[in-house]
Image (cartoon, coloured by chain):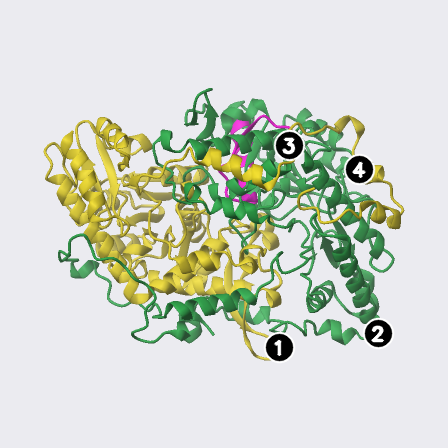
Amino acid sequence: MRYIPDSSEEEMLKEMNFTREKLFSDIPKDLRSDLKLWNEKSEIEVKKEMKRILDKNKIMLNFLGAGVYNHYIPSVVKEIMRRNEFYTSYTPYQAEVSQGMLQALFEYQSLMAEVLDMDVVNCSMYDWATSLAEAALMCYRVKKKPRFIISKNIHPERKKVLETYTEDILEIVEIGYDENGIDLEDLKKNIDNCCGVYIENPTFLGYFEQNLEEIEEIVHKNDALIVAGVDPISLGIIKPPGEYADIAIGESVGYPMSFGGPLLGIFGVKNDMNLIRKMPGRLIGATEDLDGNLGFVMTLQTREQHIRREKATSNICSNEALCAVASAVYLAFLGKKGLKEIGELCMKNANYTMRRINEIKGFKAPLFNSLHFKEFTVHHENMKEIDKKLLENNIQGGVILDRIGFDLKDTALYCVTEMHTKEDIDKLISVLEAI
Amino acid sequence: MLIFEYSKEGKKAYSLPSPIEDAEIEIPENLRRKTLNLPEVSEIDIVRHYIKLSQNNYGVDSGFYPLGSCTMKYNPKINEEIASWEKVTDIHPYQDESSIQGSLEIMYRLGKALCEIAGVDNITLQPAAGAHGEYTGIKIIKKYLKTHGYSKNEIIVPDSAHGTNPASSAMAGFRVVEIPSNEKGCVDLDALHEAVNEKTAGLMLTNPNTLGIFEENIKEIAEIIHDANGLLYYDGANLNALMGYAKPGDMGFDVVHFNLHKTFSTPHGGGGPGSGPVGVKEFLKDYLPYPVVEYDGKKYYLKYDIKHSIGKIKGFYGNFGVIVKAYAYILTMGNSLKRVSERAVLNANYIAQKLKDLYELPYSELRKHEIVLSCEKIKRETGVTALDIAKRILDYGIHAPTIYFPLIVKEALMIEPTETESKEELDNFIDVMRKIYKECYENPEIVKSAPHNTKIKRLDNIKAVKNPVLSYRMLRR
């Protein structure tokens, strides 16, 4: 029997003075039923079968982004993620034997706080979309006003998750956008009775939000909170959310794409106890032991479900802790110079690719005349045909926006990172040119 | 020492290629980042620092981890290896359907197997954790009732329930009605009758309950809820007790969540990632979050068009990296999952029988996969608390059980050994518990001031709350 470590069962039953039948005698006979699965398999059989299935997946030259990014995972990060003591531990309820995980999570909170220029980052949320939903609910808890503003140019999946979570609680108001970011006049018109405003920077379509100062003034003057969705890879070069937002969210970095999960949602706020006490999720704090040594514990738990039950700020319990450790190692690995360099590298590679695509007849890239980071829109009157041609050549083009529910016809969102080489781009261009 | 403290100008771990074209990029002044206080460290600094941290952490691979309600079973290494394959990690969720057939097939097969194990018909793998599954399930119940013209706003939970049950219900907009347990530690049918009315949307229950006791009146409970046009929700935290013996679907549960990171051996990762699929009976299939994975006889595909779907509850399709591990486990075990539950139940009852003369075992004797002992008498006679005993257990190189839960047992120790522990390991734990009991009476101070053998002494939780220090920048201030 796999994973059952001995054959002492009869001996145990004898010592207990139990029969085997007694163990399940409390389950009524008419509720009993067997499993109709299959017979146990050996390790060799399992590996072959899993390989046979997974080999149907194809890894291609890939220009997809839209919230899941193909960034390089350093071997150091992978190696540390394989440490059994980390990955086989539970939530660190017993702090004295969990200092390693607690400190690693505290370091994630600290490193991400620096990246965001926030003070307090939880560890952690499920992903960017649920971070947005929780942020909107938090704005409501703090400001008690029934409307929440988003822009029409945010990720459609994030919008859908937000709608699920805020149904019957908040009215979601959508405002317009242009090449400078969200529409300021539309914002002013709708700000009344709003608890929060959500912006993305870079925007979902890849360009930077230009009006940060104006947005801050309008939102704060109207006693609402700014929630900013950010990409940490951009924050070595562009203004951090701590300079303009109250709550920073986003998708973290340092773990693979894995078909869209597990991921790690960022959630950070300023050092304001009114905000901190209304935050969702787990927080690790520094303290001392009986001898005065620095140590770490889970803290401010009266916000959480296991203490507060129905009055908790969120129901979140299991989260994405191991991804947070990966993010910590990744951010330490890059350090202050590396984060800047990788941001510049992605931006240069993406802008180079964008320019080359734009030079091809029939293509327009980008659709919005603005400064783009690592993603950009590509317009062609027959985008679906282009996508097919690319696939025939083993290239996965950018995501076709109306396929994922974004209201922009004949347009794809391309992503280029540090992983792409000149050969990759040449290959893409040559296929596009041949169409 | 924190990673920040290794920092020295000029140290560097990363290496990056040159840009494809090194054109200057002008970021306007008002958008540009000015300062960034990340550390500068070398690769060897990072490796040694985090290896040191890992050595200062206790996992299932370090030793016995009888944390009740958490099912800390062994995490098979083959599953980890498979989940690290490129064809798992390097796949983007928006790839063309023709290039993700492997991922979709794994999801489809896992879904089918889970439905068979729990006696349900349809499933979503989207939720990222158990509580996320609860939220999804309660939203499904809400939408179903609303669509059928009911206006119901109350969810009933027993006082022995996990904290996530009331929290998830409240988050979905329900009023939570708590009912007391009876003298057997089970749902009190009279109290349930009293709590049920036209506003009742459903009942959340785990079976066996958090005391490890099988709810003997489950069929009556289901009848009471269904008669009131409410639905029955199964919290899957305790499914490790029942596989191959009984199915929640047969007991009358309409919605069931699974904790892949408990029952199906995927590791907990220090708090996550987990995965919390939700299975439903046929009549609820049109309410699942979209997309679900379907098979048309030739290919697997993502189906978005679901009539009454509650919407999306997470980006993309679920924690695929976890899903792969759970499927590899189920593929390995197959019908032997029945033996898993048998041994899990045997191990728990073995501990109960060997400790009940010293530690009180309130309520009935026969338990399923976990037991709850009470240290109330010890506390009364010696002043030693369940917390002290938990800390003393750490001194013997064992992880402590869950303490002070369920709330209905005073000074509770909640012990779940799981099936992957040998008789020797259990006997060692039993010896330790008997030794500690003796210490409580002969030398209570050593228990009250525990732990002594860990790298750090008991930590000051109150200080952490009174003066929150939540990041390095707050620590330096």
Q: Amino acid at mark 1?
A: Leu
Q: In the picture, residue B32 is in which quadrant?
A: bottom left
Distance, label 3 to label 1, CA atoms, is 48 Å
* Extent of the magenta region: B117-144
Image position of A326 (left or right of A366): right
- The 10 Å Cα crowd at callout 3, few under 14, some 14 to 19, many 20 or more, is many
Disc number at residue B442? 2
Q: Residue furthest bottom?
A: A291
Q: Chain under label 2?
A: B
Q: Amino acid at mark 2?
A: Glu
Q: Amino acid at mark 3?
A: Ile
Image position of B176 (left or right of B306): right
Residues indicated by labels 3 and 1 sit on the same polypeptide chain? no
Pointers 3 and 2 in contact (C-beta within 8 Å): no
The mark that comes first in sequence, 1 or 4, is 4
Q: Position of residue B393 (x, y in %)?
A: 71, 65
Q: Secondary structure at mark 4?
A: loop
Is residue B128 highlighted in magenta? yes
Which residue is identified by label 4? Answer: A24
Which residue is identified by label 3? Answer: B117
Q: Secondary structure at mark 2?
A: helix
Q: Position of residue A118 (x, y in %)?
A: 36, 62
Q: What is the display colour for chain A?
A: yellow
Residues indicated by labels 3 and 2 sit on the same polypeptide chain? yes
Which residue is identified by label 1? Answer: A290
